Image (cartoon, rainbow, N blue to C red):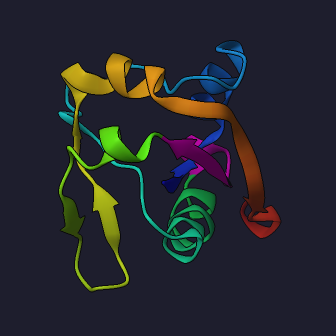
Amino acid sequence: MKLYRPVGPKELRLIEQSGMKAFPPRLPDQPFFYPVLTFEYAEQIARDWNSSRADTDYAGYVTEFAIDDDYAARFAVQLAGSTAHRELWVPAEDLDEFNRHILGAICVVATYRNRARE
């Protein structure tokens, strides 16, 4: 299954430190890891939300990765608003195992910078 994850620069640096093989652990106030099912949804978050915030240095990135289909089927697809906003809810405590099921590398497929806000 192909999935996407919108990230800011801090999370991207941690992904890079893993050799583009794993997502970093969730923070204590983040009980779930939310990869999304479409590029368009990830793009909307990275472009419209991440790149509009000072705490992300006005930058947002879309990462793309593949995960083993059988493993991905353990997680129900959740709707976050509309049918266009589909995501998997992976409990934070399952993220290490989730990372072990990533096939290949995590790739950055889009970058958004809000230069007017810098």
Q: How many marks?
A: 0
- 118 with respect to 34 (left or right): right
Residue 44 is drawn in which quadrant? Answer: bottom right
Q: From the image, which quarter does the C terminus lie in?
A: bottom right
- Residue 63 visible somewhere in the drawing: yes
Of the pair 11 and 40, the residue shown nearer to us: 40
Residue 100 is drawn in which quadrant? Answer: top left
In the image, is residue 85 part of the stretch drawn in magenta?
no
Of the pair 30 and 99, the residue shown nearer to us: 99
**Residue drawn 50% across the image and 66% down it:** 45
**Residue drawn 24% across the image and 24% down it:** 94
Of the pair 52 and 97, the residue shown nearer to us: 97
**Residue most toward the front?**
70
Helix, strand or loop: magenta stretch: strand
- 23 with respect to 57 (left or right): left
**Residue drawn 32% across the image and 70% down it:** 86
- 64 with respect to 91 (left or right): right
On the image, the x and y values in percent for residue 8 come to: 59, 43
Would you place residue 95 above or below residue 106 in this image?
above
On the image, the x and y values in percent for residue 37 come to: 44, 65
- 114 with respect to 49 (left or right): right
In the image, is residue 55 part of the stretch drawn in magenta?
yes
**Residue most toward the right?**
115
On the image, the x and y values in percent for residue 96 come to: 36, 17
Of the pair 94 and 5, the residue shown nearer to us: 94
- Region of the chain picked out in magenta, as a range: 54-67
